[in-house]
Amino acid sequence: HLAPVLEDVLRPRLLALNPWLASAPGGVDAALLELRKRVATDLLPANQAFWQQVLHRSDIQLADVQGRMRSVHFLDATDASRNDFHVVSQYVGRSADGDGFRPDLLVFINGLPLAIIECKASHHRLDEALTQLDEYQRSFAPQFVFNQVCVGINGREGRYGAVGNKPEAYARYRLQPDELVTVAALRGLPAGEAPTEQDQLLWALFESSRFLQLVTHFVLFETREGKMVKKLPRYQQWR
C-alpha cells in the first residue's frame, strides 16, 4: 500500500549518481530506507516534504565509508540524459485494506512515480477522468506521496493539476507557435493540421527535459486560511 517505486531502476541510478554509496555503510538500502520514511498518511505534508527534500533539494544525507555526511541525489536536475524515464500501464497497487488501485499510466523518473495519467475514451467526458483522480487520492493517499503531476485525457482534451487539487482547478496548456510546430512534427501531422489539446498537454508536461524542470523547480506549496495548497504553473508562467 506504499507509494510504488521501481527499485530495479532506482538502485542502479542511485549508484550512478552517487558512486560513493557502493562503499558506504548500508549503501543503497540505507538510501531507500530514508526515502520510505517520507511516506505518510497525511498526504500533502508528506508530499511537500518529499518534494523539498528529494526533488527540489538533496536533503537526505548518509555517512560515506570515511564517516563524512554526504547528500544523496535521486536524480540529476540539470541533465535529463542522466536520468531514466519510464511509463507503466495498469500498475496494480493496494490500500492498507486490500482495495485495488489500478491507474492507467504512471510516469517515473529513476523509478520514482512522479506523475499519473488517467485516460478515457474519446466518447467519455473529460471530467470523468478528473473525478477518478480525485477519488484515487482520497482512497489511496500513500500512493500519491511522491506524485507531482496529475493528468486527465480523453483522446482529444487534456487537463493537469497537482495533488489535492479539485477537478475544477485542473487547467489546459496552450503552446507557443514554434512549440506547436514541434509537436505537429513529432505526431507526423499533415501541413496545416494542429495538434490536439491532449497532444499539446502531453508534450508540454512530459518531454523529458521539461518534465524534469517542472518537478524540480516549478512546484509551489502555500497556505491559505490555515490550509495547505499545492500548485503547478499555468502555461503563461512557464515558457
Image (tube, rainbow, N blue to C red):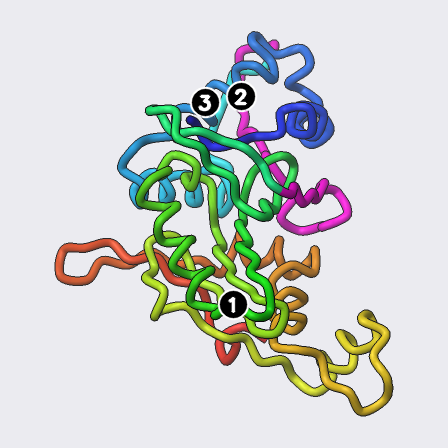
Which residue is tagged 2?
31
**Quick one: quadrant of the C terminus?**
bottom right
Lateral position of residue 121 relative to residue 93, left or right: right
Query: Do residues under tags 3 and 2 come within 8 Å of each other at their CB atoms?
Result: yes
Judge whether 178 appears above or below 141 on screen: below
Residue type, mark 2 in image: Ala
Q: Secondary structure at mark 1?
A: loop
Judge whether 189 appears above or below 91 on screen: below
Residue at screen point 33% across, 40% down: 139
Give the class, few, some or many, for how many residues have Cα within 10 Å of label 1's Cα (few <14, many ≥20).
Answer: few
Lateral position of residue 199 relative to residue 95, left or right: right
Residue type, mark 1 in image: His
Which residue is tagged 1?
124
Judge whether 69 appears above or below 156 on screen: above
- Quick one: 20 or 219, which is closer to the camera? 219
Disc assigned to residue 34: 3
Q: Position of residue 49 (x, y in %)?
A: 37, 40
- Quick one: 83 or 97, which is closer to the camera? 97
Residue 72 falls in image quadrant: top right
Q: Secondary structure at mark 3?
A: helix
Q: Earlier in the sequence, mark 1 or mark 3?
A: 3
Residue at screen point 56% across, 73% down: 157
Residue at screen point 62% across, 24% down: 7
Q: Position of residue 224 (x, y in %)?
A: 19, 62
Which stretch appears magenta? Answer: 65-89
Is residue 85 highlighted in magenta?
yes
Q: Position of residue 130 (x, y in %)?
A: 42, 61
Q: Earlier in the sequence, mark 1 or mark 2?
A: 2
Residue 96 falls in image quadrant: top left
Q: Secondary structure at mark 2?
A: helix
